[in-house]
Image (cartoon, helix red, strand yellow):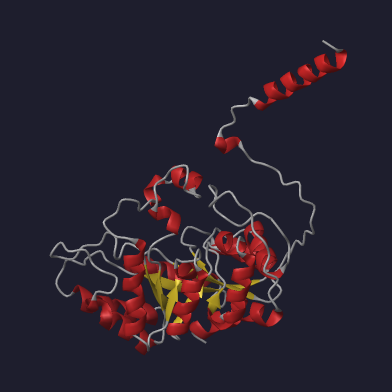
Amino acid sequence: MSKHAESQDKFIAMVSAKAEVNLPLGEFQPRSMLVTPVNEIQQAKFPAIDYHNHLDAQDPAAVLKVMDVCGIERIVNITMKVGSEAVAVIKRFNAEAPDRFSTIAWMDWTDMHAPGFFSRSVDRLEKLVEQGACGLKIWKDLGTSLRDSAGEMLQVDDERLAPLFEKAAELKVPIMFHTADPDAFFFPIDGENERYEELAAHPEWSFHGSHFSKEQLLRQRDKVFARHPRTTFVAAHVAERSEKLSYVSELLNQHPNLYVDIGARAAELGRQPYTARDFFLKHADRILFGTDLVPEPNMYRLHFRFLETADEYFEYPSHASRQGRWQIYGLFLPDDVLRLVYRENALRLLPQ
């Protein structure tokens, strides 16, 4: 064997030995080799209102420091408390800075099997608004797990809830819906699921195998939008269809009483930058800035980078387990759109 052939064989053997690495998926954290512009945005270009967050466990004074550093004018806290505890949350944040915090109330189902529940819910909404609540959130337990006193699954479009939505119109406060979850949550947790790691870390989030489909849930919700044209609705998380913006666009076209927020969906929007940018430009006056993540500077700055720059292939803001193995691209939105999304749309929904 020639020296050249022998050397080549040794090289192949060495490469093969190095390639035989049994690396667990969780330990595969590649560093991108791309060299592209990096624009680190310290503060939002315009004063911003975070319309979707959860601050019940947070210290108002500590949150204010983050807000001041990042240019956040106001945060809307969607409390997950009900009754007197909800009122206490409103008072706690108002006592710290009433011009910097607002609170959306949480639908109270605790006594739904007691007679008079649906009329009682209307009264509760009125009292919460008197205490300073600026809206009401209805979570995904409606349509998926709540059962009425007869044991029947309570549908999202149950007509017994109609007086509640009409009362919201009368009080001029929006109803926020979080119905369903990302599409991947309705598929098996297996090697084809693009959010496998997230669902493996939180298998309780999966809806796979349920007696309902995501399409059924969204159809029920969308009927409510149509039935109550005087009521303002906010469909959280880009109407729970950030994977299909053509659907969300048509939904906004059909229902002028509807807004969407982008809370916890930068990951989905940022991996389809052309489609997402067109969506923002077309519906600039109906999209609300929101994060649905613990307030901290890096989280906000990643959102600013996503909305304001043309940066490519960078980390998206997320919770610890992340949402999928991809990166995002900036939308470089024009100033008139940024002003609407960051602040002006939210001001239309908040008490003046």
* Count of numbered tags: 0
**Most extreme residue toward the top, as rendered?**
1
Q: Residue at x 71, y 68 (%)?
A: 43
Q: Residue at x 69, y 56 (%)?
A: 313
Q: Residue at x 73, y 66 (%)?
A: 310
Residue 132 visible in the displayed image? no
Say whether residue 125 is left or right of residue 72: left
- 130 lies above or below 104: below
349 or 312: nearer the eye?
Answer: 312
Give the x, y percent position of residue 352: 52, 87
Give the x, y percent position of residue 256: 45, 86
For residue 9, which quarter of the picture?
top right
Give the x, y percent position of residue 162: 27, 81
Residue 23 visible in the displayed image? yes
Give the x, y percent position of residue 87: 38, 71
- 176 lies above or below 5: below
57 or 153: nearer the eye?
Answer: 153
Q: Residue at x 51, y 62 (%)?
A: 292
For residue 46, which quarter of the picture?
bottom right
122 or 187: nearer the eye?
Answer: 187
Say whether residue 276 is left or right of residue 124: right
**Most extreme residue toward the front, as rendered?**
1
* Quarter of the rendering occupied by the N terminus: top right
